[in-house]
Amino acid sequence: MNLLNLGGIMLLKTKKASQYEYEPNILVFCCNWCSYAGADLAGVSRFQYPPNIRIIRVMCSSRVEPTFVLRAFNNGIDGVLVIGCHMGDCHYIKGFKYTQNRMEHLKKLIKYIGIEEERFELYSISASEGKQFSELITDFTNKIIDLGELKIPKKSGIIELDYNIKKN
Ligand code: FES
Protein backbone atom coordinates (compact mmCIF):
# COMPACT_ATOMS: atom_id res chain seq x y z
CA MET A 1 0.00 0.00 0.00
CA ASN A 2 2.79 2.41 1.05
CA LEU A 3 4.81 1.45 -1.95
CA LEU A 4 1.86 2.10 -4.17
CA ASN A 5 1.31 5.50 -2.52
CA LEU A 6 4.95 6.34 -2.89
CA GLY A 7 4.76 5.34 -6.51
CA GLY A 8 1.74 7.58 -6.93
CA ILE A 9 3.48 10.58 -5.37
CA MET A 10 6.58 10.07 -7.43
CA LEU A 11 4.50 9.84 -10.57
CA LEU A 12 2.65 13.01 -9.62
CA LYS A 13 5.91 14.88 -8.98
CA THR A 14 7.38 13.78 -12.30
CA LYS A 15 4.24 14.93 -14.06
CA LYS A 16 4.31 18.32 -12.33
CA ALA A 17 7.98 18.91 -13.16
CA SER A 18 7.45 18.21 -16.84
CA GLN A 19 4.30 20.38 -16.89
CA TYR A 20 6.40 23.49 -16.33
CA GLU A 21 9.23 22.54 -18.64
CA TYR A 22 9.33 25.13 -21.37
CA GLU A 23 9.13 23.75 -24.89
CA PRO A 24 9.62 26.49 -27.47
CA ASN A 25 7.82 26.56 -30.80
CA ILE A 26 10.25 27.26 -33.59
CA LEU A 27 9.41 27.83 -37.22
CA VAL A 28 12.02 27.17 -39.89
CA PHE A 29 11.72 28.27 -43.50
CA CYS A 30 13.99 26.17 -45.74
CA CYS A 31 14.62 26.73 -49.41
CA ASN A 32 13.98 23.74 -51.62
CA TRP A 33 17.38 23.43 -53.27
CA CYS A 34 19.91 23.58 -50.45
CA SER A 35 18.74 23.94 -46.87
CA TYR A 36 15.77 21.58 -47.15
CA ALA A 37 18.10 18.99 -48.65
CA GLY A 38 20.47 19.69 -45.73
CA ALA A 39 17.60 19.08 -43.28
CA ASP A 40 16.76 15.89 -45.15
CA LEU A 41 20.38 14.75 -44.95
CA ALA A 42 20.38 15.41 -41.20
CA GLY A 43 17.36 13.11 -40.89
CA VAL A 44 18.76 10.40 -43.14
CA SER A 45 22.12 10.54 -41.35
CA ARG A 46 20.31 10.38 -38.00
CA PHE A 47 21.89 13.52 -36.61
CA GLN A 48 19.98 14.40 -33.46
CA TYR A 49 18.34 17.77 -32.94
CA PRO A 50 15.49 19.03 -30.73
CA PRO A 51 11.99 18.20 -31.99
CA ASN A 52 10.71 21.75 -31.43
CA ILE A 53 10.88 22.86 -35.04
CA ARG A 54 8.32 22.90 -37.81
CA ILE A 55 9.75 23.27 -41.29
CA ILE A 56 8.06 25.11 -44.12
CA ARG A 57 9.65 24.44 -47.47
CA VAL A 58 9.76 27.32 -49.94
CA MET A 59 11.28 27.30 -53.40
CA CYS A 60 13.75 30.04 -52.47
CA SER A 61 14.45 31.90 -49.22
CA SER A 62 13.43 35.08 -51.08
CA ARG A 63 9.86 33.73 -51.04
CA VAL A 64 9.73 34.44 -47.30
CA GLU A 65 8.03 37.76 -46.87
CA PRO A 66 8.80 39.72 -43.70
CA THR A 67 5.09 39.57 -42.83
CA PHE A 68 5.33 35.75 -42.64
CA VAL A 69 7.79 36.14 -39.78
CA LEU A 70 5.72 38.78 -38.00
CA ARG A 71 2.59 36.67 -38.32
CA ALA A 72 4.46 33.69 -36.92
CA PHE A 73 5.43 35.70 -33.83
CA ASN A 74 1.89 36.95 -33.53
CA ASN A 75 0.60 33.39 -33.59
CA GLY A 76 2.69 32.05 -30.73
CA ILE A 77 5.96 31.09 -32.40
CA ASP A 78 8.93 31.79 -30.11
CA GLY A 79 11.68 31.82 -32.73
CA VAL A 80 11.96 31.90 -36.51
CA LEU A 81 14.82 30.75 -38.72
CA VAL A 82 15.12 31.40 -42.43
CA ILE A 83 17.68 29.12 -44.03
CA GLY A 84 18.77 29.52 -47.62
CA CYS A 85 21.65 28.53 -49.86
CA HIS A 86 25.16 29.85 -49.43
CA MET A 87 25.80 33.13 -51.20
CA GLY A 88 26.33 32.43 -54.88
CA ASP A 89 24.64 28.99 -54.74
CA CYS A 90 21.03 30.22 -54.91
CA HIS A 91 19.11 28.40 -57.62
CA TYR A 92 17.58 31.71 -58.63
CA ILE A 93 20.95 33.51 -58.78
CA LYS A 94 20.19 36.61 -56.70
CA GLY A 95 17.46 35.18 -54.43
CA PHE A 96 19.56 34.84 -51.33
CA LYS A 97 21.02 38.31 -51.79
CA TYR A 98 17.49 39.75 -51.85
CA THR A 99 16.62 37.73 -48.75
CA GLN A 100 19.66 39.07 -46.93
CA ASN A 101 18.71 42.67 -47.67
CA ARG A 102 15.10 42.16 -46.61
CA MET A 103 15.91 40.26 -43.46
CA GLU A 104 18.36 42.91 -42.28
CA HIS A 105 15.50 45.41 -42.34
CA LEU A 106 13.16 42.92 -40.72
CA LYS A 107 15.60 42.36 -37.85
CA LYS A 108 15.60 46.10 -37.17
CA LEU A 109 11.80 46.16 -37.30
CA ILE A 110 11.57 43.24 -34.86
CA LYS A 111 13.83 45.09 -32.43
CA TYR A 112 11.78 48.26 -32.88
CA ILE A 113 8.58 46.37 -32.08
CA GLY A 114 10.15 45.23 -28.81
CA ILE A 115 10.86 41.59 -29.62
CA GLU A 116 14.38 40.31 -28.89
CA GLU A 117 16.12 40.32 -32.27
CA GLU A 118 17.86 37.02 -31.42
CA ARG A 119 14.52 35.31 -31.93
CA PHE A 120 14.95 35.68 -35.66
CA GLU A 121 17.97 34.57 -37.68
CA LEU A 122 18.98 34.06 -41.30
CA TYR A 123 21.43 31.27 -42.13
CA SER A 124 22.88 29.37 -45.08
CA ILE A 125 23.05 25.60 -45.23
CA SER A 126 24.04 23.57 -48.26
CA ALA A 127 22.60 20.21 -49.29
CA SER A 128 25.68 18.43 -47.91
CA GLU A 129 25.59 20.10 -44.48
CA GLY A 130 23.31 17.80 -42.52
CA LYS A 131 25.55 17.93 -39.46
CA GLN A 132 25.63 21.74 -39.54
CA PHE A 133 21.84 21.77 -39.83
CA SER A 134 21.42 19.68 -36.68
CA GLU A 135 23.95 21.86 -34.81
CA LEU A 136 22.23 25.04 -35.93
CA ILE A 137 18.83 23.80 -34.77
CA THR A 138 20.26 22.67 -31.42
CA ASP A 139 22.02 25.99 -30.79
CA PHE A 140 19.03 28.07 -31.85
CA THR A 141 16.62 26.02 -29.72
CA ASN A 142 18.88 26.45 -26.67
CA LYS A 143 19.03 30.18 -27.30
CA ILE A 144 15.24 30.41 -27.44
CA ILE A 145 14.93 28.33 -24.26
CA ASP A 146 17.27 30.84 -22.55
CA LEU A 147 15.17 33.76 -23.81
CA GLY A 148 11.97 32.09 -22.62
CA GLU A 149 8.47 32.36 -23.96
CA LEU A 150 7.81 35.22 -26.38
CA LYS A 151 5.81 38.06 -24.93
CA ILE A 152 4.84 40.62 -27.53
CA PRO A 153 4.63 44.13 -26.09
CA LYS A 154 0.98 45.23 -26.25
CA LYS A 155 1.70 48.60 -27.85
CA SER A 156 3.86 47.09 -30.60
CA GLY A 157 1.22 47.30 -33.32
CA ILE A 158 2.04 43.80 -34.51
CA ILE A 159 -1.51 42.66 -33.72
CA GLU A 160 -2.99 45.44 -35.87
CA LEU A 161 -0.51 44.56 -38.60
CA ASP A 162 -1.69 40.96 -38.58
CA TYR A 163 -5.29 42.14 -38.72
CA ASN A 164 -4.53 44.32 -41.76
CA ILE A 165 -2.79 41.45 -43.53
CA LYS A 166 -5.80 39.18 -43.02
CA LYS A 167 -8.17 41.88 -44.21
CA ASN A 168 -6.36 42.37 -47.54
S1 FES B 1 17.22 28.63 -53.83
FE1 FES B 1 18.15 28.54 -51.87
S2 FES B 1 18.18 30.61 -51.30
FE2 FES B 1 17.41 30.71 -53.31
Image (cartoon, rainbow, N blue to C red):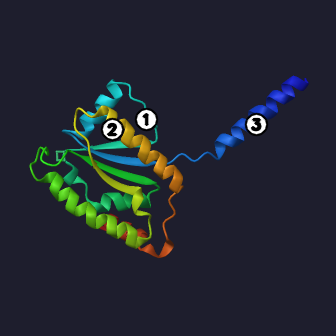
Give the residue drawn at x 27%, y 63%: 104
Give me the C-alpha separation between circle 3 and circle 2.
37 Å
Kindly identify which residue carries mark 1: 49
Secondary structure type for disc 2: helix
- Amino acid at pointer 1: Tyr
Q: Three-letter amino acid code at disc 3? A: Leu
Which of discs 3 and 1 lies nearer the camera? The answer is 1
Q: Quadrant of residue 163?
A: bottom left
Residue 113: % across, % down: 41, 71
Q: Which residue is depicted at the point 86% across and 23% down?
A: 3
Cα separation between marks 3 and 1 = 29 Å
Instruction: Look at the picture and state if 166 lies above or below 144.
Output: below
Q: Residue at position x 39%, y 42% from top?
A: 137
Looking at marks 3 and 2 on the same chain, the residue that comes earlier in the sequence is marked by 3
Query: Most extreme residue toward the left, as rendered?
Result: 93
* Residue nearest the observer in this picture, 64 or 79: 79
Which residue, given by chain and number where applicable, does mark 3 sit on?
Answer: 12
| Image coords of residue 141 (percent x, y) | 45, 46
Q: Residues within 10 Å of mark 3 (few under 14, many from 20)?
A: few
Assign the C terminus to one quadrant of the image. Answer: bottom left
Badge 1 crowding class, 10 Å Cα cut-off, few under 14, some 14 to 19, many 20 or more, is some
Q: Is residue 99 left or right of residue 16?
A: left
The numbered mark at residue 3 is none
State the image quarter where residue 100 is shown.
Answer: bottom left
Could you give the CA–CA distance between mark 2 and mark 1, rounded to whole angstroms? 9 Å
What percent of the width, then of the height, locates residue 32? 21, 40
Q: Secondary structure at mark 1?
A: loop
Cβ atoms at labels 2 and 1 below 8 Å apart: yes
**Callout 3 touching callout 2 (CB < 8 Å):** no
Quadrant where the image shows the N terminus = top right
Front one among 146 and 18: 146
